[in-house]
Image: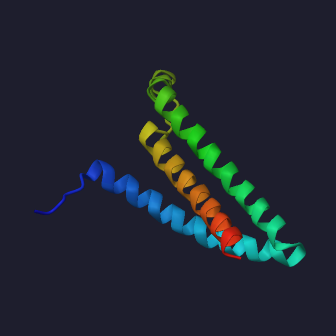
Amino acid sequence: MSLSVPDQIRAPGRRLATAALAGAIAGGVAVAVFTVDGDFRTATEQVFSLGALAFGLGLLGWSGSVMAGTGIENMQRYMKTRSNWTEADSRRAMTRLIGFGLGVMLVASVSTVGL
């Protein structure tokens, strides 16, 4: 018996995972760069804070697009703004931002504990 993951879960999961990988790489580079100027513990705390900021903004933006997305789309149609903004695109972007922040926070935490 094989487990099949629906496409509604697979695509956002892939976006989240690739963004987390990019965040992990950027977090590792940021820890190395911040360590050059100061001590290691301060560097990891600063990098974790930046990752938490990205994670929080993404989470806030994702929930905002879920709550107000349909209304904004209807307003744009009514006002004929010809904008390509959609709720789905906004959620995709915020998922990537959440994953990036998560990756940065994970690397900062692991590097603090590991070293």
In front of the other: 58 or 68: 58
Q: Quadrant of residue 34?
A: bottom right
Please name the residue shown 89% across and 72% down the image: 38
Farthest left residue in view: 1
Please name the residue shown 59% across and 45% down the image: 58
In front of the other: 21 or 113: 113
Residue 24: x and y in percent read 59, 68
Please name the residue shown 67% across and 56% down the image: 51
Quadrant assignment for the C terminus: bottom right
Farthest right residue in view: 37
In front of the other: 57 or 45: 45
**Image vertical order of residue 104 relative to residue 29, above or below:** above
Please name the residue shown 46% across and 57% down the image: 16
Residue 1: x and y in percent read 10, 62
Colour style of the rendered protein structure: rainbow
Residue 48: x and y in percent read 71, 59
Q: In screen coordinates, is 81 left or right of 54?
A: left
Residue 45: x and y in percent read 77, 60
**Image vertical order of residue 28 relative to residue 19, above or below:** below
